[in-house]
Image (cartoon, rainbow, N blue to C red):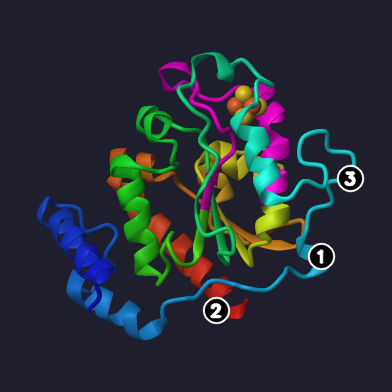
Amino acid sequence: MTGAARALATYLDQRRRMGDPGIVPEGFGPGELVELLATRRAPAGARGDGASPDSIASLSGDPVAGEAGYEELRRMALGCTRCRLAEGRTQVVFADGNPKGRLMVVGEAPGAREDRTGLPFVGPAGKLLDLLLAAVGLSRRDSVYICNVVKCRPPRNRNPRADEIEACAGFLRGQIRLVAPSVLLGVGTFAAQWLTGQSRPIGKLRGTVYRYEGVPLVVTYHPAALLRNPGWNRLCWDDLQLLCELIDRS
Ligand code: SF4
């Protein structure tokens, strides 16, 4: 069992001892689940090739992303003052993980820890995300690219506003174009709504496979929401199974 798998088993065991078996399917102990996953999926490697043409978003005319390369896009984001969120941020949180990853995870907005470290999904929600990814044989170091819909922390962790999301959207379009993932995972309402182009709440959007500019897309609850609502773990688990099927087919 790998270190990540051991950590996942420990986490699942702790949640079960706390009376929350939701993320572990019936009939499995945490260790058995991890073993099952380990045999079901070999760890997925990074994609080293380019994307198929229909998986690349057309960005012609986008004032931010344009035809910029990855480093240029990142530099543009790090100095960006296109919306009011620039005023209160400590630093821009552009992305983490592997820019050649086959899975791209899109979250909502940086929180306090992310603003401090400059990395998305750190702290308890980030740890849970890493564990969920480990459960399906993926890691942000090897095979996953992680970013948010908006790159700067909204004050007091309020929801990002529509004009802020719109101002920042060119960066996300550029990231999707340049990373060219095989599969997209949107976590949380704002990512799910932006990627699907729909305005329904996440509970209504999840459980279905969508396409974003030709790229298969699954949406699910944000890990921070899972920590607050353990009853959603089982639904998230179902969404991860959908994700696994897409990755297997990609
Ligand atoms: S949230 Fe996006 S658009 Fe707004 S200042 Fe930060 S990087 Fe620029």
Q: Position of residue 71 (x, y in %)?
A: 65, 47
Mark-to-mark CA distance, 1 and 2: 19 Å
Q: Residues within 10 Å of mark 3 (few under 14, many from 20)?
A: few
200 horizontally vs 1: left or right: right
Work out whether residue 218 can be spotted: yes
The residues colored magenta run: 146-175
Picture quarter containing residue 249?
Answer: bottom right
| N-terminal-most mark, 2 or 3 | 3
Query: Residue pushed farthest bottom?
Result: 39
Question: What is the distance, in whole Å, between disc 1 and disc 3 at their CAs?
Answer: 15 Å
Secondary-structure class at tag 1: helix
Amino acid identity at mark 2: Asp
Q: Position of residue 151 (x, y in %)?
A: 56, 33
Horizontal side of 144 relative to 236 (left or right) equals: right
Element under label 3?
loop
Three-letter code, disc 3: Ser
Left-right relation of 71 to 64: left
Q: CA distance from mark 2 to mark 3?
A: 32 Å
Residue, disc 1: 54
Q: Which residue is mark 2?
A: 248
Residue 29 visible, this angle: no
First reached walking from the N terminus: tag 1 or tag 2: 1
Residue 190, image x, y percentages? 57, 36
Residue 206 position, x and y percent, is 54, 52
Which residue is more in the foreground, 245 or 107? Answer: 107
Q: For mark 3, what is the residue?
A: 60
For the C terminus, the image quarter is bottom right
Q: Going by the picture, which residue comes out furthest to the right?
A: 61
Q: Residue at x 56, y 46 (%)?
A: 204
Kindly identify the residue that appears in the image at 38 percent across and 46 percent down: 223
Say whether residue 166 is magenta: yes
